[in-house]
Amino acid sequence: MIAVIVPVLNDSDALSGLLADLSPAPDFELIVVDGGQDRAVAQLLASRPATRLIHSAAGRGRQMNAGAGATSADWLLFIHADSRLPEGWASALAGSNAGVAGGWFRFALDDEAWQARVIERLVAWRVRMCRLPYGDQGLFARRSTFDQLGGFRDWPLMEDVDFVRRLSTAGPVVELPMALRTSARRWRRDGWFRRSARNSLLVALYFAGVAPRRLARWYARPRSPRKSSE
């Protein structure tokens, strides 16, 4: 059994698309973890009794841990609400070698712009050279490995980067040969390369020793309006 765990916070529109794309199946369960009290999320799931809705305090790491604690599934897969799983994903994940501790999917953006292809290639290079995927690639782990690691840190940012680093030391990790498609809305909003450069800078500062709470404050600062020429 696979548990697909989706943390949400004021993100009912993205969740609606995911639910429309992800039909219930006997080989996985879907758990939505709301970090608030969003009535729109509750209404969405009211017509999907096979999908579990639980609540926790806000914080992506905290919400993902709450979802993991609500299931006894052998595999735990954590995805964002604005991601879309590829066809055959469950069979590919369940078919991972017995010694694999966890892994992720290839990265893809749901936009035809040339900038999206460049960013996908840059992400592929980063993952290949540094073994450092982010949460928008869908992170999965065996239940036993997740418990051994103590789950995600209760951090406001970089909880995915930290988890991947610890996961990679717990056993072999794999990148499944199929792409998890992620919404490009944030790249379009912030500027294609501006957003990627900002994310890279924050990760570099994290590795340099800057505390995740300080990074989260910088991340949350209002963005400057984009110029019309961008």
Image (cartoon, rainbow, N blue to C red):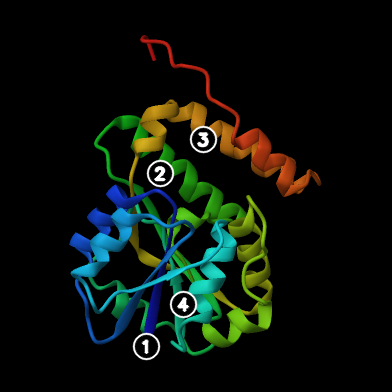
The CA distance from mark 2 to mark 1 is: 30 Å
**Closer to the camera: disc 3 or disc 2?**
3
Q: How many residues crowd around disc 4 within 10 Å: few (fewer than 14), some, or many (20 or more)?
A: many
As shown in the figure, which amino acid type bears the numbered disc 3? Ser
Instruction: Label 2, secondary structure: give it.
Output: helix
As shown in the figure, which amino acid type bears the numbered disc 1? Met
Nearer-N-terminus badge (2/1): 1
Nearer-N-terminus badge (1/4): 1
Q: Which residue is mark 2?
A: 120
Residue 182 vertical position relative to residue 170 in the rendered view, above or below:
above
Nearer-N-terminus badge (3/2): 2
Left or right placement of residue 222 versus residue 184 in this view:
right
Rendered image: mark on residue 76: 4
Q: Give the percent coordinates (x, y) of residue 179.
A: 33, 58
Rendered image: mark on residue 1: 1
**Closer to the camera: disc 4 or disc 3?**
4
Rendered image: mark on residue 188: none
Question: In this figure, what is the number of numbered marks?
Answer: 4
Nearer-N-terminus badge (1/3): 1
Q: Does the CB distance between marks 4 and 3 fall below 8 Å?
A: no
Screen quadrant of the N terminus: bottom left
Instruction: Label 1, secondary structure: give it.
Output: loop
Rendered image: mark on residue 196: 3
Displayed quadrant of residue 27: bottom left
Of 8 and 228, which appears nearest the observer? 8
Of 145 and 11, which appears nearest the observer? 11
Left or right placement of residue 82 versus residue 37 in this view:
left
